[in-house]
Amino acid sequence: MKLTAQELYNKLTVEYKLIGEKGFINFSLKNLTISIETKDSIGNLLQEWLKAWMKKYQIDFEENTNTQKFPDFYLNKEDKKKDMFEVKTFDWDRGPGFDLANFDSYCNSLITDAYRIDSDYLILAYQMTGSELSIKNIWLKKIWEISGSSGTYPIKVQEKKNVIYNLRPIIWYSERNTYKAFNSKEEFLAALNETRYQYPQTRPTNAHWLSKVLKNYSQHTGIKLDVK
């Protein structure tokens, strides 16, 4: 069954009704079974569960053989520039602290694979009580819909000792959040470009970065973006 990311999301949330469901995490070795109450492996377990769910419902997909590279899954095996998605999870009680992408790698990839900006993020929020896990909510978002400004840079990042490591999400689902999500991919690219100008390590090489990204996006999609 060939589905788009939106169709997969609808099947998972509307048809399968995963939001609100509960499960238990156990580990068995020989004749001893223990309950797992730590959260270290939840992200990997939920991704493995999702993969098994897609197989059960005969959904066409291909998993990335390199788990360290983007994306996690391809839904269109014939055209891998479309219907790519990443799986992200977070603890509902702590908020989204996951990485969207490595800052340098993402910026460099947009120069040659600008279509990547249209990829989807399937995000599962969970809550744990002991070894019991419940799914609190699920979203399907584009990167600009979960990215926003911050007090330091025009786009929220993870920074340590004045070095930017990763792009980080804002709390997109909260009305009380000070920083709102970008309204479009153009706003996202403008903020990313301005961040590269402000960041000392990328400022010297940033003069033509945005124009290269826009040209590459047009070559891949036939769409010309207007970024101010």
Image (cartoon, rainbow, N blue to C red):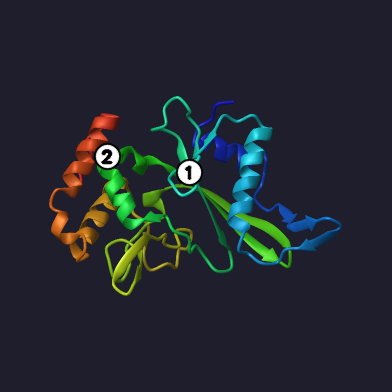
Q: Nearer the viewer, residue 37 or 192?
A: 37
In this image, 123 relative to 181: left or right? right
* Residue at (77% x, 63% y) in the render: 35
**Figure quadrant of the N terminus:** top right
Q: Nearer the viewer, residue 178 or 103?
A: 103
**Residue beneath disc 1:** 66
**Residue beneath disc 2:** 112
Q: Nearer the viewer, residue 133 or 137?
A: 133
In this image, 35 relative to 221: left or right? right
Dot 2 falls on a residue whose secondary structure is helix
Q: Position of residue 218 (x, y in %)?
A: 24, 33
Dot 1 falls on a residue whose secondary structure is loop
Lower sequence index among marks 1 and 2: 1
In the rendered view, would you say 190 is above or below 171?
above
Q: Quadrant of residue 192?
A: bottom left
Q: Residue furthest bottom?
A: 161
